[in-house]
Amino acid sequence: MSDSHASASTISAHGAGAEGDHGGDHGKETVTITVNNVPVPIHRGRQTVAEIKTAGHVALADDLEQLIDKRLVPLADDGSVTIKGEELFVSHPKDSSSSHEALFAQDGRSTAED
């Protein structure tokens, strides 16, 4: 157990760039996340919010939220997320926080147009 903790600390301390210098993406499995209802391939592991926005074709000026336990959790622009695969994200302009409700509506009803 302490070995896996030491490995995580080593990766965090050296950053993803140090691994890239030794031959690319060794140990970096590509998984799928969903951004605004669109599947997006991304590397497993810690990703910055900016990297997730870029991968999901989201404007850097927009807010990004992650669906966790049926709740949308706002993500800080300078934050990061540990990606395991199957995470769900939604974006919206910073001044319209309620517009994201329509993206998760399965029955076609939306309160965003009210």
Image (cartoon, rainbow, N blue to C red):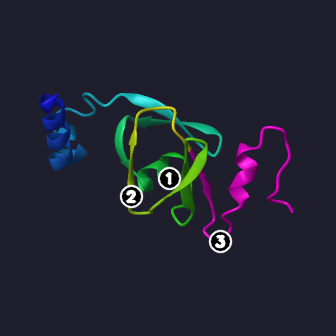
Q: Which quadrant is home to the N terminus? A: top left
Q: Earlier in the sequence, mark 2 or mark 3?
A: 2
Looking at the image, which residue is at 50% across and 53% down? 53
Counting from the top left corner in percent of width and height, residue 70 is at: 61, 42
Mark 3 is on which residue type? Asp
Q: Mark 1 and mark 2 in contact (Cβ < 8 Å)?
A: no
Q: Earlier in the sequence, mark 3 or mark 1?
A: 1
Task: Measure how far apart labels 2 and 3 are at the Cα level.
Answer: 20 Å
Which residue lies most toward the bottom here?
A: 95
Mark 2 is on which residue type? Gly
Residue identifier under label 1: 53
Residue identifier under label 3: 95
Q: Earlier in the sequence, mark 2 or mark 1?
A: 1
**Disc 2 residue crowd, few under 14, some 14–19, many 20+, Cα 10 Å:** few
- The disc label shown at residue 17, or none: none
Q: Which quadrant is home to the C terminus? A: bottom right
Task: Measure how far apart labels 3 and 1 are at the Cα level.
Answer: 17 Å
Counting from the top left corner in percent of width and height, residue 23 is at: 20, 32
Marks 3 and 1: which is nearer the front? 3
